Each structure stands twice: as C-alpha cells, then as structure tokens.
Image: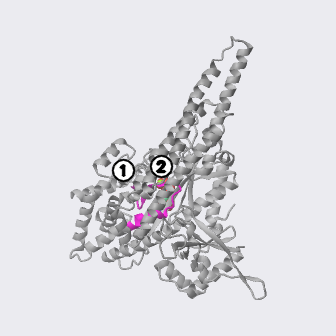
Amino acid sequence: MANVPELFGSMVFNDRKMEERLPHATYKALKRTIKNGDPLDLSVANGVANAMKEWAVEMGCTHYTHWFQPMTGVTAEKHDSFIYPASDGQVIMEFSGKELIKGEPDASSFPSGGIRATFEARGYTTWDPTSPAFIRDKTLYIPTAFCSYTGEVLDKKTPLLRSMEKLSSVAVDVLHLLGKEDVTRVTTTVGPEQEYFLIDKEMYDKRPDLIYTGRTLFGAPAPKGQELEDHYFGSIKTRVAAFMNDLDEELWKLGVMAKTKHNEVAPSQHELAPIFATSNIATDHNELTMEVMKKTAEKHGLVCLLHEKPFAGVNGSGKHNNWSISTNTGENLLDPGKTPENNLQFQLFLAAIVKAVHEYQDLLRLTVASAGNDHRLGANEAPPAIISMYLGDDLGALVDSIVNGTEYRSSGKVEMLTGVDVLPDFKKDTSDRNRTSPFAFTGNKFEFRALGSSLNIACPNYMLNTMVADELAGFYDELKDADDLEAAMKALIRKTLTEHKNIIFNGDNYSDEWVAEAERRGLCNFRSMPEAMSHYIDKKNVDLFVRNGIVSEAEIHARYEIELEHYSKEIRIEALTMIDMAEKNITPAVIGFVNRLADAALAKKALSPAISVYAETTLAQELSEKLEAFVKKTDELKAAVYGAAAYTEVLSLAMYYREKVFALMGELRTIGDDMEKKTSAEAWPYPSYGEILFGV
Ligand code: ADP
Ligand code: MG
C-alpha cells in the first residue's frame, strides 16, 4: 500500500524542497517571482539551478530537459546531460542558472505558420518558474515557454501566462476601485476532467487506423453499444482498476492531484478528474496526465486512446474545463455568496463574463475546433457547436430581476427528504446540472464543456482569460470616475446583462428547437473546424489579442495557418489510411470470402444438382455488388485526395478536405461496414468493434 502523503510530489522540486535546499535569500527572491511575477536575476537562477541539479542527481538523474508546448499539439523535449569536463579529463555534474533560464532548441522543425524562414532557425525556451520542475525517467523536466529568435511566440504556454497576468492586473484594478485594497494578485484556476478509452494492445496493433489516426475508420457496430447505460459509473474491471491505481500513483508522484475516477458512458471509456490548480500548472498537469496515461496503459498491455471519437456510434471523449477566478486573499470571485442579489462585486464579474462569452462566442467555438472534435459537437453527446451559457434557476432568476427591474426571490436551499429513517436528509443544491450546456455555471465556477479530449487546455484558457480581462478593463474605465460608484455599477450591470442576455440559455441544448432559436438570437453555429477557424483572423478577434498584448497580428495569422494546415493533414492521413486498408486488406478479404462461397456452391452442385446453394449464391451476389461499389468509391476517394493539389490557400484547402474528402470517407465507410456485417469473422482482416470494445 502506498503512503500517499509521502508519495505525493516526491518527483517534484516543489515548495517544500525549495525551502529546504535553497539559501534563504534565494528562496525568498524566487517566491517573489512566483507569487508576484517579479523579474528574476541570474544569481537567483544560479542558486536554484544548483539546488535543482543536486536534488535531481540524488534522485538518479543524469539529464535535464526544457519541456515545452509547441503548436504541434503535443509536448516537446530535448535532453541534455549534466556532464561538464573537469580538469583531470573526467566529468562533473553541472547545471548553471543560464542553462535553467534559457534553452536553444532548433525551432525550424516546429510549426511556425510561415512566421520565419528555415534559415532563421533559432528558437528559445524560457524557464517558467511558476510551474515546478519534476523528474520522469531519470530526467529533470523544466517547464518552459517557447519563442523564436526574433521573439515571436511559438507555443501555447506563453499566451496563457500573458493572459493570466493581464486578467490579474485588470481584476486588481477593479477590486481596488471596490475598496479591496489588500488584493494584490488575482489568479485563474482550472480543473480539467479528462475522458479516455482503454483498449487491449493486441487489438490495437491489428488496427492501422488506430495506429495512424487514433480512431477507427471502418467498423460495423457491435450488437451492443451504450444503450443499456450500464457502463457509466459501473463497477471497474480488475485490469482497468489496476491501471487506474498505477496511474494515480504516478500522477501523485508528479504532484498532480488526481482525485476522481470512474467509468464513462461508452464501453471501455473512463474519466479522471484532478483537484483544480492555477491555470498554467493545471495545463502542465493535464499534458502530463495524458502522457502518463499512455505510458501507464502500455505497462498493463493496454492502449489509452485520447482521440475525440475513436469509435463511431458510441460516445467520444471530451474534456471539461472548470474555470474560476480567485484573489490572493482567498476569495473566489465567482462565488455568488448567500445573497447574490446584494453582491454587486459578483454581479459585475458575472456581467463581464456574460458579455465576453456573447461577444467572443466565435473564439470559444474555434478554440475547441479540431478534426476529432467535429465528430462530437452537435452529435448529441457533447454540447452543440453553438456557444451559450447556462446560469441555473437562481442566477437565471437574478439576471431576469436585474434586467426587468423586478424583485429577486431565491428558491433557497431545499431540504432533501430521503424518506428513509436510516438515510440522512441533506440540503440539495438550488441549481440542477445542465449537462447539455457548453458553458455552465456550477456553483462557484464555469464549466466549459465543449473541449475535445486531446486538446491542450492552454488555448481555451488564454482565450477565456483574455476576453474576460478585456471586458473588465472596459468596466473599469466606465466606473473609475463615477461619483456614485454603487449607482454606476448597478446601471452598468443592468445595461450589460440586458444587451447580452441572448447568450444565456437554460434549456436543452441538444434539441432542434434550440438550433432554430439560437439562429433567431443571432448566435453563431459553425458546424465544422474550417468554418469555425476562419473567424480566428476576424478584425475584432485580432484587435482583442493585440490590444491586450497576448499575441501579435502576425502570430495570430501564423496560428490560424498552423491549425488549418494541421486539419488538412489529419484528414489526408485518414483518407490515405482508409485507401490503404481498403486496397490491401478489405477488398482482398472480401474477394477471398466470395471465392470460398463460389467454390462451396460449385462443389455442392457437383455432388448433387438437388442440393440448395441458395445461401452461397445470394451472399456471393450481395457481397460482389457491394464490393464493386466499394472499389469504385475507393478510387473516387483516391482521386479526391489527388484533387487537393489544386488548392494552395489554407482555408480553401481545409474546406475542400471537409466537403469533398471527408464526405467521401463517410460514404466509403458505410459500404465497408456493410460488407463487414456480411463477411465471416474469420475472413475479416480487422478485429471487430465487439472484440475491441467489450474485450477489456
Ligand atoms: P462533475 O463531473 O460533476 O462536473 P467533478 O467533481 O468530476 O464534477 O469535477 C469538477 C472539477 O471542478 C474538479 O476538477 C474540481 O477540482 C474543479 N473545481 C472545483 N472548484 C474549482 C475552482 N474554483 N476553479 C476551478 N476548478 C474547480
Ligand atoms: Mg463535469
């Protein structure tokens, strides 16, 4: 049995270790940087580097790496050993402040969206002292931000850190205006709930589609799916439980507060939720969690799938981004308190968020857009592609009363009577959960529920922080010279909520009526990734980021290009994989099976013309017809992939892939799956959905 408190953070150079190992003045200076964002000087960095190295070497490390989050969508690392030549020809283990602060990976092989030519290959990684270093596989990992030689941001982490700073500074201004002089810093917190699939490694190895693309491109449904609703919260199978225990321990060692685990809706699907942390640490931890999930699965003969839709016909995987804002004095700014109707500070922050989500709904939509997530949004398993907010009964009523100038009445906490003596009665929450809303208020935080499972949460969070910071800054300007602050606040809150209440929707987001209603309200409904992404470079969005110093116009254009290019490449890989599977395995397998049927029929007839060959001939006939359609469709898909060469501009290329190539892939799949249903299991070249999903 693990001693959890002892295990927790044992692989992290955390606050306790820093205090123990750093000279006092160095520790104090570092803390000032971490807490207040004060600049850090080289002598402090030298002290920290030395202490980090001593600890890492004691723990058996030989190497260190700057760990960063380029635009590829996965983390990157380049390992350097600590060795340093000594005068006697031997080596000593050394690590300087300079090496801690700055790394120089070759940036030319990371996506930059045409921001640099390859000859300007230099890039820098810069230590992020607010996220602690940790050890994995005998290597000291140092969380860093990544930029080009000329200073352009090339990663996901830097905009997040900037947006946190920005939100902090404007929120502090606002709070000072409200008399909270003791607040010096405001931080955003995130708790990401992570969904994933676990399947048997042997099955995985037989599926090129899973290997190349992370999802199955063919596969007829199994006789059973998720309709019995018996997997959600179901008891966890032994093999999966062993994986989960191992995963928890690995994460705890890395200082990740893994808290909740359970089976999810689809067969073989599960979820892990940590206790929330500051946004940038939550981001690092979520990236780590996904990596550790994959590695831990391997140890158990399993594969962890983080694709948004690995299997058609059953739910895919998402991520819920629980987000809140709190002060260094320990106040959660999204906590309405007992009397929200009198809590003008809360109302002001709420109004800023409502306005931000309404004005920048397109950004929230496009930040969760990806080839994988296109399968989920609007497919009745995740929120629709329309962004709206759910406030619940109480806050909904409060907003109505503010807008209409009527009196607010809270439903109050209701006693929940279980009616059974041995069961304790309890107070139930006043607002029920609305599981269909993309952006739901849940007591003292918002839950952004439209994220795909593999997404780096830095992106939605920097967008969210930036748009809210921008609205708060606007509020501050309007309020700062007010003679009667209270009256001015009330007027501003009322005006804002009246103008932006159209983004609030408390009903069923999965219903067709909502799609029509949202259109009447003028809300965006971008159905595909390219359609959503095309709005990244809209003037109002570019202005938002530039105005707040988060990313420059050139950087936004680069990001836009990278995302769209990535999308086109993903669809292309999927199409090529399908063609490969079709031509090399599926078509030959069906031909072989039809041959066997024909041989069997001929043999029977030779034996006696009176024997029925009905089964063989009907099936051979049916499969031959399907096969003809299948082969023709494969050729059509192939031609469509070649046809992409005609498009050079990123958006039209992505649109082409979506409208032409992706559509044909769906048609090819339908025929393939039909053939699978009719072909003998032993002749079919790939493990079936039943074997994959119900095998574990
Ligand atoms: P549910 O599945 O009902 O949404 P969970 O308990 O699985 O709830 O997840 C809720 C998540 O919200 C957890 O990760 C939790 O730590 C996080 N959370 C709670 N309070 C905050 C907060 N103030 N800021 C950010 N995240 C929070
Ligand atoms: Mg949730």
Name the residue at the front extreme. Answer: 646
**Alpha carbon distance from label 2 to label 1:** 20 Å
What residue is shown with label 2?
657
Q: Residue at x 53, y 75 (%)?
A: 128
Q: Amino acid at mark 2?
A: Tyr
Q: How is the image coloured?
A: one colour
Q: Position of residue 34 (x, y in %)?
A: 51, 78
In the displayed structure image, the side of residue 681 where residue 193 appears, left or right: left
Q: Position of residue 304 (x, y in %)?
A: 61, 52
Of the pair 653 and 332, the residue shown nearer to us: 653
Q: Quick check: is 691 in the magenta stretch?
A: no
Q: Position of residue 404 (x, y in %)?
A: 22, 56
Earlier sequence position, callout 2 versus callout 1: 1
The reply to whether dot 2 and dot 1 touch (C-beta < 8 Å) is no
Residue 462 is a magenta residue: yes
Task: Say which residue appears at 47% left-offset and 59% top-offset.
Answer: 563
**Local secondary structure at mark 1:** loop
Describe residue 568's horizontal placement relative to residue 694 as left or right.
left
Foreground residue among 13 and 657 = 657
Check the image and report above or below for 624 versus 536.
above
Above-or-below relation of 590 to 576: above
Crowd band around label 2 with a 10 angstrom C-alpha radius: few (<14), some (14–19), many (20+): many
Position of the C terminus by quadrant? top right
Type of residue at label 1?
A: Asn
The x, y position of residue 307, in whole percent, is: 55, 52
Res. 525 mark:
1
Closest to the observer: 430 or 605? 605
Q: Which residues are magenta?
A: 438-466
Residue 468 visible (yes or no)? no
In this view, the residue farthest toward the top is: 610
Observer-side mark, 2 or 1, equals 2
Asked if the residue at label 1 sits under 8 Å from ligand 2, the reply is: no
